[in-house]
């Protein structure tokens, strides 16, 4: 099982890989992640790691230049959406019981 440090390092590596993604990366015409959004996400991750925030469960490119960090815990899902440089928007959802 990877350590928290390894998970954070993997997260940063996944985000850095987003700089290499090209348009139509999914074969459905999606735009590549905007490099400014990737940079914002990397800076946010570095800060979150430094203050002890838990690492995300998933790192996901979006279809319109955005990207998400996702945390899954039981029936909770938290998303940090990086769709504009310098901004992060949050979404919290809970599965119906």
Image: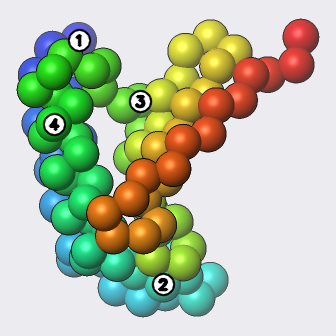
Earlier residue among tags 4 and 2: 2
At 42% from the left and 70% from the top, the residue drawn is 84
Earlier residue among tags 1 and 3: 1
Find residue 83 and report its horizontal and vertical position in percent.
47, 67
At 16% from the left and 28% from the top, the residue drawn is 49
Q: Nearer the viewer, residue 96 or 85?
A: 85
Mark in front: 1 vs 4: 4
- The answer to whether the residues at label 1 and label 2 have Cβ atoms under 8 Å apart is no
Q: In this figure, which residue is indicated by the disc labeled 3?
A: 57
Residue 47 is marked as 4
Q: CA distance from mark 4 to mark 2?
A: 27 Å
Residue 31 is marked as 2
- The answer to whether the residues at label 4 and label 3 have Cβ atoms under 8 Å apart is no
Q: Nearer the viewer, residue 1 or 88?
A: 88
Q: Which quadrant is home to the N terminus? A: top left
Label 3, secondary structure: give it: loop
Q: In this figure, which residue is indicated by the disc labeled 1?
A: 1
- Marks counted in the figure total 4
Find residue 50 and report its horizontal and vertical position in percent.
10, 26
Find residue 56 and report its horizontal and vertical position in percent.
37, 31
Mark in front: 1 vs 3: 3
Q: CA distance from mark 4 to mark 3?
A: 17 Å
Residue 40, visible in the rendered structure: yes
């Amino acid at each position: 099982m990877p350590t928290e440090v390894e998970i954070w390092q993997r997260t940063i590596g996944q985000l850095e890989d987003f700089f290499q993604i090209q348009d139509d990366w999914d074969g459905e015409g999606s735009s590549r992640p905007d490099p400014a959004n990737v940079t914002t996400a990397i800076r946010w991750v570095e800060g979150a790691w430094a203050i002890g925030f838990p690492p995300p469960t998933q790192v996901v490119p979006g279809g319109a230049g955005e990207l998400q960090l996702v945390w899954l815990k039981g029936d909770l899902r938290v998303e940090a959406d990086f769709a504009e440089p310098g901004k992060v928007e949050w979404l919290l959802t809970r599965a119906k019981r």
